[in-house]
Image (spheres, helix red, strand yellow):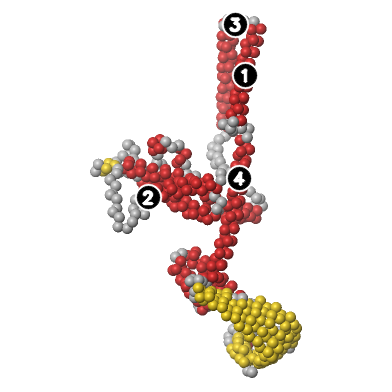
Amino acid sequence: MSNATYNQLWGEGLAELTEQVHLENPLLGSPEGAEPPPPPPPANIIQAFQHFACLYIKYMQIFKRLEECYDCMVHPQKREDVLSMLELVIRRVVELKHALVKWNPPNKDVQNTVGGIDENFPWEYVNLDDILVDLKLPPETLEVPVPRYFREDSIVTVRLRDKVIQGYMKLKHGVDKIMVEEEEELEPAPDMSIEQAIEIIQRNERGRQGKQRAMLVKELREEEKRRRMYDATSQLEMDPEIAACNIQRLFRGFFSRSTAAAARDEELVFIGMKPPKHRGDDLETELNMAYKKRKQEQTDNKEAYKVALEDLKDVVREVCGLAPYEKRILDMLKTNAVGCEKRMYKFAKQRLGGHKRAVKKREDVKEMNMLVDSVTKTPDVKMYGGSADAIECVDDDCDINYYWEWNADVGYAFHFPMYAEEDNLIARQRASALAGGRQQFWFQLYVYRINLYFDTYLANVTLDNYLSYDAINRSDFCYAGNWFLDIARLALLLQVDVRSCKHGVLGYIDDEISACGWNTYYIMKPLW
């Protein structure tokens, strides 16, 4: 069937569902202050059972219609809406089934009356045959099919489980399959002597031979009876030519009727009032192929929808930035305090109201923080030039050591950050071209290391473009551009590093330097 057919089926199911909801709750959709309808009159058990039975049958019809729509629709967003309604209908069917069990009218044999009112008799096997006859519906209406998406959604898990089981069987037993057979438990044979066993065998054999002789005698008597009846009956003699004419008459009648029926069927097939006789398999094969193509189209559309949704989320994130509560979670992460992960989870769960959503939001914020750090800390740089270095001691365990490095580069660097600041979207384009380099020299004396950086730049040109736009009100556009030029820039910088070990600076005296590391306490202090 076409997509329009399933769209129409979906519309009909939605209309019936809306009608049922309004019938069950007349106040739904009524304006505020409207007078409520009068309460329904009191009903007995039979009336209540019939009411819930009619609702159950109607919701079963809606459930089958929506399940067929969800199974054959190819539009991913429509399928999500149909799935949400389908799950609600399944839940309502289960509720009505419990109501039918609760208000099942009792049988006359177990009927109990208290105060003139019949008590209900909860029984899981309800009888709805009379209601089906009144509604003129077939018995197939009450069949509860298992939704096909149950199996489709769990097919990956089932395959993984089968692979794990197959692996265990291969590992433990060396086979791919183990046939499970039911073992029959045989009763233990009683203790007996050889004479008793022979006596039992002889008795059974004599009984078998007696039964065979009786059956043989019965067959002989019946055959003798048929022979006597044949001899006593007078035989009707017929001329051979007359017998041949009778046989020909019967065969010609049968052949004429068969030819007329075949011609009538060919005419009905030709005018389209009857399907071809030998094309049932072809039609079924075409339907199966169309169903497989529709399933493949569903998978392709679902993957494309996920990719498009992720791209759209990225665009919205770049334009609008983080929400206020997301900024709060990001601040908790940047503090890097003890228990920040737990605090982030609690705050996200309080705002989003669920464990899975809170964990997912925490991971998303951590991923965004890593992405922002990678963008801001690693701009695109291209350099051409040369460098040289020298170090006295290669190992990091030397007490006295020195290192020097010189650089001479010619190249460029560019960086295009984009971020949100309150309601404004900020975009900056920054590019620079330089010629020069940073010269480094450090000297180590036990736990101290003195670093000297000497920047020598012949020229450094920087272009900076600034754009600001109010993404909420779509106004207040601001644009600014400037450039900087440094010629013959010289600078001398100082940095002091101290080696800290497992037991502090004293750990260096204990020769426990395997867990030592350099910590910077005096960072890039300009001297000149």
- Return the residue at label 4: 290
**Left or right: where 373 falls relative to 458:** left
> For mark 4, does the 10 Å Cα neighbourhood hold few (<14), some (14 to 19), or many (20 or more) residues?
few
Tell me which numbered mark, 4 or 1, is placed earlier along the sequence.
1
Give the vertical position of 181 relative to 361 (above or below): above
Q: How many labels does the image show?
A: 4
The residue mark sitting in front, 3 or 1, is: 1
> For mark 3, does the 10 Å Cα neighbourhood hold few (<14), some (14 to 19), or many (20 or more) residues?
few
Which label belongs to residue 22?
Answer: 2
- Return the residue at label 1: 256
Residue in the image at 75% along x and 85% along y = 388
Q: What residue type is labelled 2?
A: His
Q: Which amino acid does label 4 sit on?
A: Ala
Mark 2: secondary structure: helix
Assign the N terminus to one quadrant of the image.
Answer: top right
- Which residue is nearer to you in this view: 386 or 13? 13
**Residue 291, image x, y percentages:** 59, 46
**Left or right: where 343 falls relative to 234:** left
**Residue 11, image x, y percentages:** 47, 48
Residue in the image at 69% along x and 80% along y = 412
